[in-house]
Image: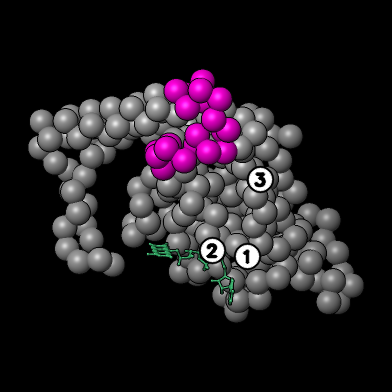
Amino acid sequence: VNDEIKISLSDGSFVRLDDCMADDLSVVNAARISFKRISEDLTESDIGLINFLMKNRHGTPFEHSSFRFHVRAPIFVAREWFRHRAGWSYNEYSARYSKMEAEWFTPSPENIRTQIGKPGSYTFTRMPTHTSLESARIINQSNKNSYENYERLVEMGVAKELARTVLPVGMFTEFYATCNARSLMHFCTLRAAEEAQKEIRELAKAIEKIFSEIMPYTYNSYCNNGRQAP
Ligand SMILES: Cc1cc2nc3c(=O)[nH]c(=O)nc-3n(C[C@H](O)[C@H](O)[C@H](O)COP(=O)(O)OP(=O)(O)OC[C@H]3O[C@@H](n4cnc5c(N)ncnc54)[C@H](O)[C@@H]3O)c2cc1C
């Protein structure tokens, strides 16, 4: 169990590696089963094989390494994350069975941005300080008002599954997400990219950092081959 591997963001999100069964050696051994050969230690030739597999998009040997993450993120980030289906498994906090906590995402004023351009090619820039401060205040107040209505409904005896419908997508949720190294790379390709929304991008970068430490040669090969999952 890798309790110590946890990356927290200033907005209250985090990624914690709950456990993993992952290393570079398992990639080459999965590939070499074709010839009934096993490596005990990673050699230069094994590193070359990882590069060959990545470059030629032989992806299945990367599926034998798996990572289980415990994630805390706002619901709008979780919704984006859960769109990743292939090779991922999820379980999430239940707002039917448990009361939602009074914890919601409020962007820091320096992260309040405006969008310029057309859909698909937006660029984001900072706003004047007074607008940022006022925007952050409105976002926080709006979430607070919603949460107070939620609490009131729960106190009145309304079922949690119904009371939750007044809560916004900025509320924090927690989930377990398990994926294999191939699906992890695909996730990083899409979600650590500049086009992805900042709030999921930072979590994807945290995932990428953990991946780079556990499977360094696979990670290097992924970066050197255009950051495309094989
Ligand atoms: C910048 C950005 C903007 C986005 N905007 C929108 C948006 O406006 N609206 C919206 O709905 N979504 C949007 N998405 C989500 C996007 O459409 C995908 O749902 C998400 O990125 C997951 O990608 P994926 O399907 O490749 O991943 P996975 O579900 O993990 O699938 C991985 C790969 O497996 C294969 N695969 C998986 N399922 C199937 C299948 N059923 N049939 C065939 N092949 C399959 C594909 O090769 C796929 O690339 C956006 C994503 C990004 C990164």
Q: Where is residue 52 shown, x and y percent of the image?
A: 63, 74
Q: Nearer the viewer, mark 3 or mark 2?
A: 3
Category of crowding for the residue at label 3, using alpha-carbon neighbours closer than 10 angstroms: few (below 14), some (14–19), many (at least 20): few
Q: Is residue 133 above or below residue 169?
A: above
**176 above or below 47?**
above
Q: Distance between the residues labelled 3 and 2?
A: 20 Å
Residue 86 has which mark?
A: 1
Pointers 1 and 2 in contact (CB under 8 A)?
yes
How far is mark 1 from mark 2, CA to CA? 10 Å
Image position, residue 193 (x, y; %)? 39, 58
State whether residue 37 appears in this view.
yes
Kindly identify the residue that appears in the image at 67 percent across and 54 percent down.
89
Q: Would the CB of label 3 be found within 8 Å of ligand 1?
A: no
Q: Name the residue under label 2.
A: 186
The secondary structure making up most of the magenta span is helix
Identify the residue at image location x=57%, y=38%. Answer: 161
- Indicate yes or no whether the magenta region holds residue 169: yes
Q: In which quarter of the image is the C terminus?
A: bottom right
Name the residue type under label 2.
His
Query: Which is more N-terminal, label 2 or label 1?
Result: 1
Label 1 lies in ligand 1 vicinity (Cβ under 8 Å)? yes
* Mark 1: few/some/many CA within 10 Å (<14, 14-19, 20+): few
Ligand 1 is within 8 Å of the C-beta of the residue at disc 2: yes
Write down the region rendered in magenta. Answer: 151-170
Q: What amino acid type should be assigned to the residue bearing mark 3? A: Asn
Query: Where is mark 3, residue-wise?
Result: 91
